[in-house]
Image (cartoon, rainbow, N blue to C red):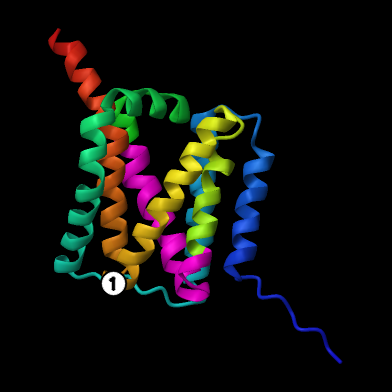
Amino acid sequence: MKRAKRDPLDPRLLFLIFVAIGVGTVLLDQSPRLALLWTSLLLMGVYYRGHHEVAIDFALRNIGRGALLGAIISVPVLAFLSEQLGTFNERLYATRDPVLLLYQICFISAPIEEYFFRGIVQSRLGSSLSIGLYALVPLVYFVPHAPVLVAFIVFMAMGILGIVYAYVRDQYGLAAAIACHVVVGFVLQVMPSLITTLRLTLS
C-alpha cells in the first residue's frame, strides 16, 4: 500500500518553513530579520499562487467596510494608549521613525500577512487555524528581541485581531481584510510615533 505524499504546498508546512527561518535568524538585528521573514512569507505566497487560485475579491465597497471596521476598533485604543503604544512599538520594531513604520507595517507586513494567513491558510484550512497560526507570529517575530511578556501581549492582541481579520475576509473578501489590517496598523503602530514626532518638532 502506497503512503500518501505530503503536499509541498500545504499551508501548515509553509508555516513551519517560516518558523524555521525565524529560528535560524535569531542572531540578526531586528530590522533585517523582519525584512527577511516578510520576504519569506511573500515568496511562499507567490509560489503558492503559481499552483493554486487565491481569490482577492476586490470590490471598493467591501474594501471600505474593512477599512471602516479597522478604524472603529483601533481609534479608541489610540485615544487612550497613544504614549504606551509608541514605546511598545519602538521595542518591537527597534525604531520610532513613523516613515519607516508606515513602510514596514502598511505596505509590507499587512498585505503579505493577510495574503498568507487569510488568502492561503484560511481559504484552504479554515478560520480557526488561520487565527491560531497568526497568533503565533509574534513569537517568531519578537521573542528574540523583546521580553517574553511583551511578546505574550502581542500574541494575545494578534489572536484577537486575527479573529477580526478572519471575519472580514469571510464577510467581505481578502482585499477588505488587507484594508482592515492596514488601517489598524496605521492607527496603532504608525500614529503613536507620528504624534510623538510632531510634538517634538513643534515644541
The picture places residue 170, in percent across and down from the top left corner, at: 34, 72
Relative horizontal placement of residue 191, taking residue 4 as reference (left or right):
left
Q: Mark 1 points at which residue?
A: 171
What segment is highlighted magenta in the picture? 102-129
Position of the C terminus, as image quadrant, is top left
For image coordinates 44% across by 30% down, the residue present is 93
The type of residue carrying mark 1 is: Gln
Vertical placement of 150 versus 162: above or below?
Answer: above
Vertical placement of 194 versus 59: above or below?
Answer: above
For image coordinates 61% across by 31% down, the residue present is 144
Q: Is mark 1 on a helix, strand or loop?
A: helix
The picture places residue 1, in percent across and down from the top left corner, at: 86, 92
* Image quadrant where residue 192 sits: top left
* Image quadrant where residue 69 sits: bottom left
For image coordinates 31% across by 51% down, the residue present is 181
| Any part of residue 57 in sight | no
The residue lying furthest to the bottom in this view is 1
| Any part of residue 17 in sight | yes
Q: Main secondary structure of the magenta part?
A: helix
For image coordinates 81% across by 84% down, the residue present is 3
Relative horizontal placement of residue 138, taking residue 2 as reference (left or right):
left
* 101 drawn magenta: no
Relative horizontal placement of residue 199, taking residue 52 as reference (left or right):
left
The picture places residue 29, in percent across and down from the top left corner, at: 56, 27
The picture places residue 104, in percent across and down from the top left corner, at: 37, 39
